[in-house]
């Protein structure tokens, strides 16, 4: 299946994220979420479960925040001794849908394209300076490596009889410190290697050539913006 140009996805992600903060009605937010979900499941199914898990974990904090600051109106249900009212439910749903829109819009870019595709697009389509394009592509490329490092650290802790659930802040800090030290050294030598290969001699260009799918996405964005203005 033909993928959109990366610039098109960047415009889509930025626009939908902005509209998510403008929309305040649940129906409007669902209208904005629907095409984003469809696009994500078409282009970015690989690794999407991690995005969903992360968002679901964040929903707990959103629910607590809604009860703390927006718990007004009529009582909807009781949670132990706490009365959850209409204001809290509405605030929770609004912010949750916004979070899903932003997360899925970001996933559409990060999971649809490889780090090399993103790097080449930033340089040769968007005319992005190398000092910006390279760190972005490197950060995306290094995520699976960090995951592997984490698995190896947890395995070694298990072999030594240490905790592996990392609920204790001290245990978590020790693992995070190791990850930061290892990946700082890796990033330093990767940067040196890129410099030796002539990274700074690359000349960015602007060669955006939209395809049919790009025109479809851009038309969809225009319709969403018009919907915002009209309704």
Image: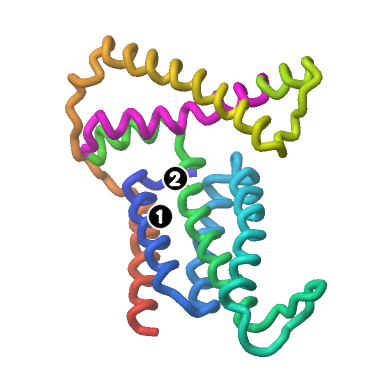
Q: Which residue is mark 1?
A: 13
Residue 223 position in % (x across, y down) = 37, 71
Q: In the image, what residue occupies the spot 65% across and 32% down?
A: 170
- From the viewer's side, name the closer residue of 28 and 44: 28
Q: Quadrant of residue 207?
A: top left
Left or right: 48 in relation to 209: right
Few, some or many residues within 10 Å of mark 1 (<14, 14–19, 20+): many
**Magenta stretch: residue 99 in it?**
no
Please give the label number shown on residue 64: none
Q: Quadrant of the C terminus?
A: bottom left
Magenta segment, which residues?
127-152
Using residue 101 as the reference point, say whether residue 21 is left or right of it.
left
Q: Secondary structure at mark 2?
A: helix
Q: Residue lying farthest bottom?
A: 74
Residue at coordinates 18% horizontally, 34% vertically from top-left?
A: 205
Q: Is residue 140 magenta?
A: yes
Query: Do labels 2 and 1 touch, CB within 8 Å?
Result: yes
Q: Say above or below: 160 vs 9.
A: above
Residue 140 position within the rendered picture, expressed as x and y whole percent measured from the top left = 46, 33
Q: Residue furthest front?
A: 170
Dot 2 or dot 1, earlier in sequence: 1
- The coloring applied to the image is rainbow
Give the residue number, with chain letter if any, for mark 2: 109
Residue for point 50% across, 44% down: 1
Name the quadrant containing residue 21.
bottom left
Magenta region, main secondary structure: helix
**Considering depth in this image, is 223 or 175 the residue closer to the camera?**
175
Residue 137 left/right relative to 59: left
What residue sits 62% from the left and 59% below the top? Answer: 61
Tell me the SS state at disc 1: helix
Instruction: Give x and y (percent) for residue 230.
Output: 35, 83
Q: CA distance from mark 2 to mark 1?
A: 8 Å
């Amino acid at each position: 299946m033909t993928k959109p140009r990366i610039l098109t996805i960047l415009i889509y992600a930025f626009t939908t994220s902005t509209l998510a903060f403008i929309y305040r009605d649940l129906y409007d937010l669902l209208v904005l979420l629907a095409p984003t979900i469809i696009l994500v499941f078409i282009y970015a199914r690989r690794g999407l479960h991690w995005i969903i898990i992360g968002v679901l974990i964040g929903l707990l904090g959103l629910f607590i925040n809604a009860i703390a600051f927006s718990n007004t109106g009529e009582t909807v249900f009781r949670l132990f001794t706490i009365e959850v009212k209409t204001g809290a439910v509405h605030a929770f749903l609004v912010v949750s849908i916004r979070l899903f829109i932003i997360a899925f819009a970001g996933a559409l870019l990060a999971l649809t394209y490889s780090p090399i595709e993103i790097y080449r697009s930033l340089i040769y389509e968007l005319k992005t300076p190398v000092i910006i394009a390279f760190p972005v592509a490197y950060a995306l490329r290094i995520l699976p490596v960090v995951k592997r490092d984490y698995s190896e650290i947890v395995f070694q802790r298990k072999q030594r009889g240490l905790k592996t659930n990392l609920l204790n802040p001290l245990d978590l800090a020790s693992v995070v410190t190791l990850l930061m030290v290892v990946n700082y050294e890796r990033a330093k030598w990767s940067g040196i290697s890129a410099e030796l290969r002539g990274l700074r001699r690359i000349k960015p260009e602007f060669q955006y050539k939209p395809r049919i799918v790009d025109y479809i996405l851009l038309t969809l964005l225009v319709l969403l913006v018009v919907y915002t203005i009209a309704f």
